[in-house]
Image: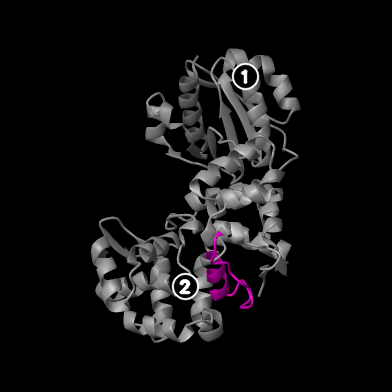
Amino acid sequence: MDEAAVFEHVVDELDTRGYQPLVHVPGAHRETYANVLERCETHSITIAGRYPDVLGFTNADRVFAIEVKGSTELLRGIGQAMKYQEGAHVSYLAAADDVVEQHTNLLQSKGVGVIGAADGGVTRWSSPPSSESHEQVVDIEGQLSVRFRHSDIGGDIASLSLAQPLNYLAPVVAVAEHGPLAEDELVDVIEAEYGFGAGNQARRSASSLGLLRGDARYELTDQGDLASTVLRGYGVTSLSELDAIKGEVGRSTVVEQHRPLAILLRNCYDRHPEFRLLLDALRKEGPEVYFPGLLRRLVHEFPNVFLNTFCTRSGRKRARKLISAGRVSQIYEDETVWKDVVRTNVLFNFVQQLKHVGVLAAETRSHSGKIREYDPDEKPWILR
């Protein structure tokens, strides 16, 4: 039995059991697995630098991961399923039943569950004993929560690319005042009434925070309605009024000048699981956070937050290879590596955002120059 057939039977069984699965299929194999892709959403979540074939929540809200094989490469599959124990409560190897049966005792002894499939469907489902290693499971739960628990959150926090987070409220004010708007209409209104030329970035960021939804026309989510209500209560009903508040903040911070709006923004950030995990890492490193130390904690405890939030696209690929190869320490110990993989605007725009919403103290110094000129010892992140 080939891998594609096993995969389809596994998806059938997960549906029967009430599990919530996401699948990973490389682009080159999309035609082979077309039936699976029609039924399941995809993911790009890694455990130990590798993408589980199937990842999700069980019907008891435990994280599960499955490595799928056919009738060959089972030893490789065993190794991958064992790796997934680092980020899942339960990990399985699925394969043709007549072949995987021969490895059942070994898999069970290693804490890996066994799923066997034949022509008629799944014929064997042996759950593993509880795994002893869950180093990254909180990270994986957070990533899955982005997909399953907060459908109005439209992207990772790396998409919040503007230094002043008040700009993310501009689309909320515009839609509240004018009603649902098409993308170009929304951008035009922000430019005309807010005097701001980065309307598209503001729109994307508002969507990432779960304040907006829509394709053809954008409207407010429930969270967007709540933000609009808070803004009206604070006397902000137009973009010109929001712009005046931004002008008052100037070189200060929102939390120092307009604390209720900082709390509103902080609550929007806090709803994003990746931000909560990052905040957890900052608190563990604080009160003074030195960047290489933060990277060390992230790549060991929350690697997907590191990959999604801090890395450039090419840097993400390089860092994932290092994680997969077991050379994790090279990412934070070798300055030439982390300065190559980290996005420059993490050190400026993101630091400024964290200062405005009250996570970092005002005395924290951001870095606006080239990343190769950044000295983390001179510019620690100071928790507020």
Query: Which residue is located at x 31 percent, y 58 percent?
Result: 214
Residue 302 can be seen, yes or no: no
Q: Is residue 356 magenta?
A: yes
Residue 199: quadrant of the picture: bottom left
The amino acid type of the residue labelled 2 equals Gln
Q: Report helix, strand or loop for mark 2.
A: loop
Residue 175 percent across, percent down from the top left? 30, 71
Q: Is residue 193 left or right of residue 355?
A: left
Observer able to see residue 32: yes
Q: Is residue 176 left or right of residue 271?
A: left
Name the residue beneath numbered marker 2: 164
Residue 234 placement (x, y as % from top left): 43, 85
* Residue nearest the viewer, comparing 344 with 81: 344
Q: Main secondary structure of the magenta part?
A: loop
Q: Amino acid at mark 1?
A: Leu
211 in relation to 137, above or below: below
Question: Image quarter for residue 133?
Answer: top right
Numbered range of the magenta stretch: 350-370
Residue 377: give its label.
none
**Could you tell me which secondary element the residue under label 1 belongs to?**
helix
